[in-house]
Amino acid sequence: MERSTALVIDASVTVKWIVPEQGSSYALKIRNAHVLQEISLFAPDLLTYEVANALRFKLDLREGDMKRAIESIFEVDLSLMGPTSQFISRAASLARAFDITIYAQLTLR
């Protein structure tokens, strides 16, 4: 099955997969659609560090649970994208054009 939709997600969406909070049900629908190969998920490679850092502050999350949560992010098989000059330049141009942060709109095209 060919995936027709591609989404770029950030750490806040990914944390909602692990920690129940407002928006978690929608975030989980997105993850599940990716797992079922209905959509493709992309993220800047910085996402893994950001999620690990956010989980570090969730003191009610035990150490072992935190490690399993981090492993689960890699098991979902997100397409993690490293920075390239073309990619970052495009993101910066879009951020300026739409008056938003570069983090809010990193896109593939």
Image (cartoon, grey):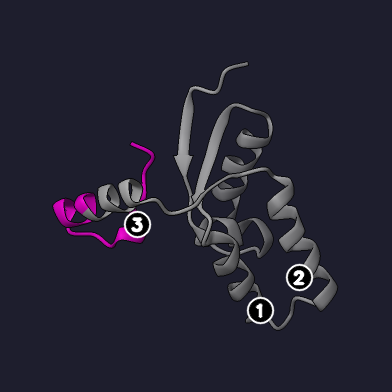
**Mark 3 lies on residue:** 104
Residue 54 relative to residue 98: left or right: right
Disc 3 residue type? Ala
Q: Secondary structure at mark 3?
A: helix
Residue shown at the point (20%, 51%) measured from the top left = 93
Using the image, determine if residue 19 lies above or below residue 56.
above
Residue 103 relative to residue 56: left or right: left
Q: Secondary structure at mark 2?
A: helix
Tell me the CA gap for discs 3 and 1: 23 Å
Disc 1 residue type? Arg
Residue 97: image location, x then y, percent: 14, 51
The tag on residue 66 is 2
Disc 2 residue type? Met
Residue 64: image location, x then y, percent: 85, 72
Which quadrant holds the C terminus? top left
The tag on residue 56 is 1
Q: Label 2: few (<14), some or many (≥20) within 10 Å?
A: some
- Tag 2–tag 1 contact (CB < 8 Å): yes
> Magenta segment, which residues?
93-109
